[in-house]
Amino acid sequence: MATLSALRWVGRGLLFAAVGLLLGSAGAVGITRLTGHPKVAETVITLGYVGALLGWLLGVGVWDVWAREWFGLPTRSLQGPGGSRFFRFNTDHKVIGVQYLVTFVVLLLLAGGLAMLMRAELMSPGRDVLSARDFNTTMSLHGIIMVAVAVATIIGGFANFVVPLLIGAEDVAFPRINALSFWIIPPVAVLLVLTPFFGGFDSGWTAYPPLSVLNAQGQLLFLLAFLTFGLSSILGGLNFIVTIAKLRAPGMTWGRLPIFVWSIFAAAIISLTATQFVALGLLMVILDRVVGMAFFDAARGGNALLYEHVFWFYSHPAVYIMILPAFGIWLEVLSHFSRKPLFAYKLVVGALLSVVAISYLVWAHHLYTSGMQGFLHIPFMVTTELISIPTGIVFLAALGTIWRGRLWLTTPMLFALAVVFNFLIGGLTGIFLADVPTDIQLQDTYFVVAHFHYTIMGGEIFALMAGVYYWFPKITGRMYNERLGRLHFWSMFLLYQVTFIPMFWVGIHGMNRRVADYAPNLAGANQFISIAAFLLGVSFLVLVYNLVVSWRRGPVAGANPWRARTLEWQTSSPPPVENFPYPPRVVGSPYDYGVPGSQHALPGVAGGAGSSEEKEVRNG
Amino acid sequence: MNKDTVRVFLLWLALTALGELLVLRLNLFPLAAADEAVIVDRAFRTLLVLAVPVFVFVLVTLGYSVLRFRSRGQPEQDGPPVRIHKPWVVFWLVWTTALTLLVIVHPGITGMRELHMKAAEPVDLVVKAEGGRWFWRVTYPELGVTTTDEIVLPVGKHVRFDVSAMDVLHSFWIPAFRIKIDAVPGMVTRIDATPTQLGSFNEDAQMRLQCAELCGLAHAQMTVPLRVVSQAEFEAWIATQSRQARNP
């Protein structure tokens, strides 16, 4: 019975979605009949999906929680205790954080499974396991799902759960927008999972036209999914910027903000302001497909290069949406587990914001070999290389923080230390791709594949793992098993290196990316990579087992098992709905380990919310 | 300087020397069969030489810290409350900025300049390559020959490739020459190479024209074997091809 009531709202969402799908499709059929437009199927898919998306959102809770007030009707809250709250249009940031985390960890495992399929095909040259079409769809799905995981897991999951706590707030600025940005995600996942039934899509996650205009209808599902996901990302960015700017507790000045909050602020600026560009590019491809426009059709005056510029104008900054929050977790964990102040805090804040600024000016380094004008090469090489300076500052902070600290090598700390190593390799190999002469050879080879896996998986996903173990006791109120945590760390860390280091080598030796087949001279290396990859996949089972079992039966963690100074640890685990009984009063830096008598915050007192100090902060 | 700093410095020195030795001695690259390949490989090796000290510095500091400063169990005391150390910050910023500017200029700009100067030399042979799903049509416009199953080039001659696409994006890549340029519908892109070594795909898989931009179903199979031959053999091959074209 409990399960049934938990799924009541999801069921209603599905019902409304079905109605929306019917209405949208009927509309599409009507329009194509009236106008004689030949692309009936594509029109039906597009309008049917728009109807289904609106129906889903209204049914799952937007109507009751939100839309009723537009018509002067009383709204209702879908909050509440028990497991069913995770299956509702709940506006509690902690519930939304858990919804994001669980959804995206499942997607991470799913896309990881797709990588295993690809490695099975690549075990030996020639065609073995998958058809050409299935390989391309598998590869493309792996790409886009992992991109979504990388963009949304830390921001949607941890930032949602932790940022309001870290700044001493009760919730985010716009709780209903927050819930909306989560409930937009399930339709995205459904569309992507359905692509193989519509002929798949073979364009990778980049979806360059003209291919993406000409191929099977699965491509259209992909385009709609990506577009919808972008909307969620924009709403999330908006919410975090306003939350951090406006809802800080009394005394929480910008100079006392934990670095994770700064990193989310920086990433949110990119989410809010760059995502529109990829949406524009995707929309133009959709219009080419569905309406028959010719933005990218050279024969009718279009230009294929245009898409590459618009796409990367978002998609390069997007890698900083992925990595900046990872820097935040990384430095946060290093400071708390070295019991030392975060080294060069102000410089790091400056570095994060500089990365945001420069990230908008580097996109064309993806286009060195695209045939764009030659005079653009040097300017983009310069901006791209310049980003190493702020990134270097983050490394300086990491090393300066652990130097002469008291390093407590728990699982989160091990993962954070591993990020230093992995991102070092990711960063240094990036220089080979930023420099034009070497990129001419390396572009579109496995060297690129290895490089971005070292930054995004070795950097971000390892930081995500640090976050999972670090905040697990706060989120669940229980402790994970440390021994299994270390087993997971060491197996994942070592197998990760063994899997991805050889990819640099096969890239240098002439293996291009996104291929199901390769020259026989690379057979041995690929077999080695595949076996290592399978074992790496198995190491994730240790994580899943540990998390599931510990969530149910782990020992009670207590409010602050790490004796960390930041605010989320100064309330119970898990925190009550209102986070803190009264807003805490921040009086110092969160990182002043070893400073005698220093304190980050004092517990709030009744009536403290309207104090003069708080007004000062809010007005300032 | 304290004891820890001195030890890290000495470790850095030793491991950097070892790393540089490996970088300079090891045979890192596959067959390089054109002047352009030599320029690109040299740029790659320069970047590796510059990367080694940075890599080793971070690695040694990290490894030393983990081994030397770890605490058994939850630490009872806090570490020293050092928020910043100006000399180190200045040292770090100066070096990272200097290295960044260096890699932009060398091998970045200098390597591009070398490639441009090569391309500016007189062209001996123009080859037209059109990419379509999933084949390459290679034409020798001055010689009136078209082929889809093999590219043959004379050794030591400056070849200019005029690259275009018939349907979707492709990319013209010859791994042994280290050259790559996309084939874009509606435009002609150019890239140059001067083959320096005789050889063929059968001897070394790097000798191939490979599509490097995802173009759909048979993208991986979109390759054409490459053969570099002497001028005399090249002329003979052209003659055979034209004869076959006339009497199929």
Image (cartoon, helix red, strand yellow):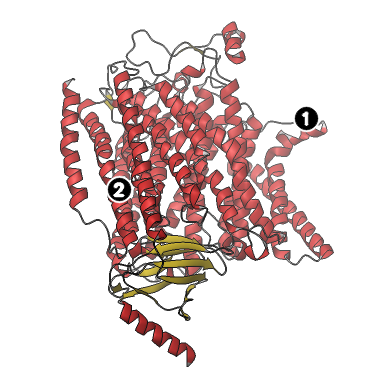
From the viewer's perspective, is residue A241 above or below residue A121? above
- In this view, the residue in front, A347 or A155, is A347
What secondary structure is found at the residue carrying circle 2? helix
* Chain under callout 1: A
> Tag 1: residue type?
Pro
Taking depth in this image into account, of A89 and A206 the one nearest to the observer is: A206
Measure the C-alpha gap from mark 2 to mark 1: 57 Å
User: Quick one: SS at disc 1?
Assistant: loop
Badge 2: residue crowd in 10 Å (few <14, some 14–19, many ≥20): some
Labels in figure, total: 2
Residue at 59% x, 7% y: name it: A611
Residue A146 location (% of width, % of height): 48, 49
Residue A573 vertical position relative to residue B120 in the rendered view, above or below: above
Q: Looking at the rendering, which quadrant does residue A390 occupy?
A: top left
What residue sits right under mark 2 in the picture? A497
Q: Residue at x 44, y 12 (%)?
A: A588
Q: Nearer the viewer, residue B22 or B77?
A: B22
Res A1 visible: no
Question: Which residue occupies 43% across, 30% down?
Answer: A328
Residue farthest front in this picture = B122
Q: Where in the figure is residue B10, as x and y percent of width and height?
A: 15, 31
Q: Is residue A451 above or below residue A589?
A: below
Give coordinates of residue A208: x percent, y percent. Answer: 55, 57
Left or right, A565 with reference to A608: left
Q: Earlier in the sequence, mark 2 or mark 1?
A: 1
- Residue A19 visible in image: yes
Residue hosting label 1: A74
Q: Chain of mark 2?
A: A
Quadrant of res A594:
top left
- The reply, left or right, for residue A556 in relation to residue B134 is left
